[in-house]
Image: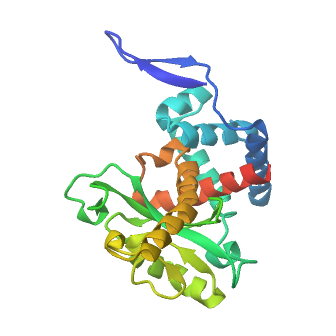
Amino acid sequence: MFSTHHASSEEPRLVPYRATVDVPHELVEHVSWLIYARRCERGSRWRKLGCFRQALLVLVHLRKNEPLPALAAGFGVSAATAWRYVDETLDVLAAWAPGLHEALTGLGEGDHVIVDGTLIPIDRIRADEPYYSMKHRKHGMNVQVIARPDGTPLWFSRATPGRTHDLTAARAHGIVQTCLTRQILVLADRAYQGAGATFRTPYYHHREQPERYQQFNRDHARLRAPGERAFAQLKSWRILRRARCSTRRISTIVQAVHTLLTCSYSG
């Protein structure tokens, strides 16, 4: 159930209507069991929404980026209660997201991964300089990903201000050093030139170089292309196409969505 506002001569009137969300029923059940476990752990008393309905509310919010006050009215709870449900569920899901070392478990010398960065657009004015990305010409938060050769995401970083350069972010998150320690080959774009270690990036001005340089760039682009799938899957959850929340919450949302993606793969 969702809600929308209808203007009238007196005051806005909420009108509920039924809709669907494109997530598997099994995923809603899985999230509801995680919520149930958290409630038992805390000894929570009766709630207005059961675990399944709370899970559904949160998944609709993440998947469709519906305004939470309208969504809360559709589920028959107050906006404050809906916020509490969302915060609680995001924390539960984010806790299951793997750390960097855990995500790379089983990988070592002879394996390769794809590293890339993306911008999560946010609502900010131009004066908020740390969040403005000159590369993308918009405000946002920088998120790094490590993906398998087929594009399956292994790990998403915490979100940093959009002005952060990809190479700076990769070093700050420990990606460069961790991949060097494990001798994992990394395929990355030109933004990571200078990383050294086990990073491989395309050549600049390759068209002016011998044919072997041009062939290297073509092969590199072909192997790195599946990495875009990781971000496509991340942003299939529309809340990350344009986040309207506090920048401090974006890292938690990214980790929560990663857990949901992992559940989808295992399902």
Using residue 215 as the reference point, say whether residue 18 is left or right of it: right
Residue 196, position in %: x, y? 46, 87
Residue 113 higher or lower than 63, as above or below: below
Q: How many labels does the image show?
A: 0
Q: Is residue 81 visible?
A: no
Give residue 11's position: percent from left, percent from top.
Answer: 36, 16
Residue at the image point whose x is 39% and y is 77% from the top: 210
Quadrant into which the N terminus falls: top right
Question: Left or right of 124: which side holds 101?
Answer: right
Determine whether 100 is above or below 53 in the image: below
Q: Quadrant of residue 254?
A: bottom right
Measured as percent of width and height from the top left, residue 193 is found at 40, 79
Of 149 and 72, the residue lying toward us: 149
Q: Which of 267 and 114 is in front in this view?
A: 114
Q: What residue is drawn where x is 40% and y is 46%?
A: 244
Q: Quadrant of residue 185?
A: bottom right
From this viewpoint, which residue is outermost toward the front? 211
Percent position (x, y) of residue 151?
Answer: 62, 59
Residue at image coords 74%, 52%: 265
In the picture shown, does residue 221 fall above or below 198? above
Q: At x 56% / y 76%, what residue is drawn?
A: 186
Q: Can residue 251 be seen in this view?
A: yes
Q: Residue furthest top?
A: 9
- Say how the picture is coloured: rainbow
Q: Which quarter of the picture shows residue 73? A: top right
Q: Residue furthest left?
A: 127
